[in-house]
Image (cartoon, rainbow, N blue to C red):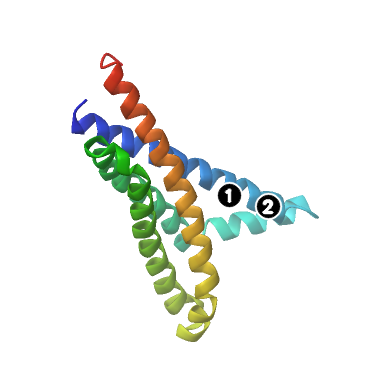
Amino acid sequence: MNTAIAKQIGGRKTFRRSLAFILAWQLFLLLIETRGDFANGFIFYLASQLNIFVLLFYILILTAAFLFGRMAGEEILNSPHNYIKTGIKYALITSLILIGYWFTVGVFQGGGVEHTLHALPKTVAIVIVVLLLIWLWSVRHIKQEIDYRKKDPSK
């Protein structure tokens, strides 16, 4: 097992789990939005999800997941006993990036600093909890695959 393979495993596992969560979240939003009138709800859902800032948010999540997942794969290969610390570290770094993006968009597009700061605590809590779940799920699977590949290098 070399670091290139560990990076590939880390990037792939974290990207896929982040994408799975985003798709589940989108399905949840679609179901909420289309409760009463499906056609109008679907139009409102599309309008909200095709916003450039929302699309950039999802791109930022997936890019961070892939890049930090590669780093996590290498760290887990080098010190497999600290994989939970690795997951927490990258979850917090990703959270800071996403909160910084959200804050910037909120200030310039949403209504100023006061409005953005008012909504900040709830948003921070949600983002950190969700990203911790995604990252802990990802690093567990990264470690499992790295351990499996160490035992059977032909895979």
- Whole-percent x and y of residue 98? 40, 62
Q: Which residue is mark 1?
A: 25
Residue 63 appears anywhere in the view: no
When asked about the image quadrant of residue 154, the answer is top left
Q: Residue furthest bottom?
A: 114
Tell me the amino acid under the disc marked 2. Answer: Phe
What secondary structure is found at the residue carrying circle 2? helix
Residue 134, placed above or below residue 103 = above
Q: Nearer the viewer, residue 98 or 77?
A: 77
The quadrant holding residue 138 is top left
User: What residue does disc 2 label?
Assistant: 42
Horizontal and vertical percent position of residue 69: 32, 43
**SS state under label 1:** helix
Write the residue at 31% across / 39% down: 81
Q: Residue furthest top?
A: 154
User: 34 and 79: which one is in front?
Assistant: 79
Q: Where the C terminus falls, by quadrant?
A: top left
Would residue 37 appear left or right of 55 to someone viewing this image? right
Sequence-wise first label, 1 or 2? 1
- Report if the CB atoms under discs 1 and 2 are less than 8 Å apart: no
- Percent across and percent down for residue 33 are 70, 56
Q: Disc number at residue 132?
A: none
Residue at left offset 28%, top offset 33%: 8
